Amino acid sequence: MSLYNWYFIFLQVPNRTQFIKRMVELSQAINLRIRLIYYPPYHSKYNPIERCWATLENYSNGAILDSVETAVQWAANMTWKGISPIVHQVKATYEKGIKVLSQELELYQNYWQRSETLPKWDITIVPA
């Protein structure tokens, strides 16, 4: 199967039921396989966002990022390997503690394919 039919997401926390539910819904809506690959705990060196923070830290060269606007401006103007990021400030409040009930989650598990070798760390979501 071509990689163009896949979308890869690298994550750090393996048991986010609300997130997985939304990924199944997205997979079905756009008819795309989504592969969720989780980083083992304490392996942030493999996480691309950690490289982004390091790049921002080097780019700002000690500048004081004393406001959200300043941080967003610095982040929008940095580059990594010649590529500039797309930076948006999310102003919505992230709701914590939202969980999917186990009965509802069972409906979504039909679309999961866990890796035989790493079932906790590698899940493929297949559209209907």
Image: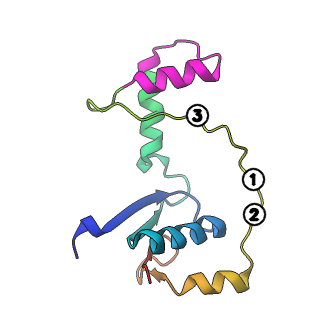
Front residue (pair 86, 112): 86
Q: Report the residue marked by disc 3.
A: 89
SS of the residue under disc 2:
loop
Residue 122 appears anywhere in the view:
no
Near-viewer residue (41 or 78): 78
Q: Earlier in the sequence, mark 3 or mark 2?
A: 3
Q: Which comes before the other along the chain, label 3 or label 1?
A: 3
Say what secondary structure mark 1 lies in: loop
Q: Which quadrant is the N terminus positioned in?
A: bottom left
Q: Residue at x 42, y 35 (%)?
A: 86
For marks 2 and 1, give the CA distance: 7 Å
Label 3 Cα neighbours within 10 Å, binned few <14 / some 14-19 / many ≥20: few
Q: Position of residue 83 (x, y in %)?
A: 30, 33
Q: Is residue 62 above or below residue 101?
A: above
Q: Amino acid at mark 2?
A: Ile
Label 2: few (<14), some (14–19) or many (≥20) C-alpha neighbours in 10 Å: few
Q: Which residue is mark 1?
A: 95
Amino acid type at mark 1: Glu
> Is 67 part of what is drawn in magenta?
yes
37 relative to 44, above or below? below
